[in-house]
Amino acid sequence: MAERRVLLRGGTVVDGTGSRKADVLVVGSVIGEVAADLGAGPRGALVLDAEGCVVTPGLVDVHTHLREPGGEESETIESGARAAALGGYTAVVAMPNTTPAADSADVVRYVLDQARSACCHVQPAGCITVGREGKVLAPMAEMAALGVRLFTDDGTGVQDPSLMRRALEYASSLGAVVAQHCEDASLAGAGCMNEGEWSSRLGLPGRPSLSEDVMVVRDLALARLTGARVHLMHLSSARSVEAVRQAKAAGLANVSAEATPHHLSLTEALLGSYDPVFKVNPPLRTPADVEALRHGLSDGTIDVIGTDHAPHPPEAKQVPMCEAAPGMIGLETALSVVLTDLGLPIERVLALMSWQPARLVGLTESQGGPIVPGAAANICVIDLARRWTVDPARLASRSRNTPFAGRALTGRSRHTLYAGEPVVVGEEAQR
Ligand SMILES: [Zn+2]
């Protein structure tokens, strides 16, 4: 059988090297040709319209909860990867807070097996500690041997500083990144929204931004001491952004920071609806915090936008605020929310959502690289002018807990090619 040929026609290629008007011909799983005008392409080629669109390396999410094994009623590797592809992603890092947790080679192998038929690359992350209990280090070396490059107890942060120090030394010897969910549990307590004026007014227990700030400062110190690579996940507070800015300015180069679309665009005021769809950890904070996160994006303090896609079934969300599970889905809305709300140049958006995350998790061989002949064909085509309204019922995720329901957005991923295969064509999943 002849190799599949796909021609992306009429778009503007934007990658880490710049932008230019060009058609892109994909042959099999790689990019075959990039030129100003490839006409109708070779005979038998599938021609996908990219007129007026941006053709770019696929997005990479370093922070996705796929819930499998154990939480298949909310998401599976297959459904989550489909949601990712529809959002323009060609790779996601699967968080290890599954049931059982991915704290051993066995569970990592299971995820890798399930991921083989997924419609984007699924890179398993491993736990820092056994069962994410924060007591004993997980066997990181055996997971690293299977290709795990990022370790995290996400859902909770590693509370014990001496254990965190040992985790960093261990991960560093493996060339891996340690990603921290920055919350001091004793300060966060049972709070279910940001602590402040709104929590007092609503009579809900607060979760102070201080709980994030102290762990960020602690981990910056540990990063300095150990030289290990530390990734600070879903920053939400102005003070923690400032702490990272100062650390980087002082020369600390082994630290990266992440922000989510929801923390960059939503505030605690939404909790006034008492709708648990807006409950997330760390919580939505004040307009000043949102402003600080946005500033952190534009000045390079924040390196990546991660979704923290966290699917939950209705029964986990349709309960009183304090009992509801924290988290929001985001794979299918992330790019559109960023394009609509942040006003960043497209090159900067793609740096934050494609090549910088690819670099962070060591996927540069096949993800986030320049669109040139011979490169792996992991590509997304974005229509920057596309207007659409988020309808939770039409999302591919098994869960519906999006905080953006009913929101009108501008800009959307139109086609996604994963390893050369058109997995999304015209905003429709192909399998
Ligand atoms: Zn987290």
Image (cartoon, rainbow, N blue to C red):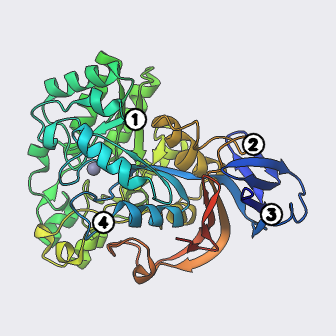
Which residue is label 3 attached to? 9
Which residue is label 2 attached to? 372
Give the spatial CA distance, label 4 vs label 1: 25 Å
Element carrying mark 3: strand
Which is more N-terminal, label 1 or label 2?
Answer: 1
Task: Count the marks.
Answer: 4
Element carrying mark 2: loop
Element carrying mark 1: loop
Estimate the x, y position of residue 246 in percent, counting from the top left. 40, 29
Q: Are marks 2 and 1 in contact (CB under 8 Å)?
A: no
Estimate the x, y position of residue 256 in percent, counting from the top left. 42, 34
Say what amino acid the circle numbered 4 marks. Answer: Pro
Q: Are marks 4 and 1 in contact (CB under 8 Å)?
A: no
Which residue is label 1 attached to? 147
The residue mark sitting in front, 3 or 1, is 1
- Residue 402: which quarter of the image? bottom left
The residue mark sitting in front, 4 or 1, is 1
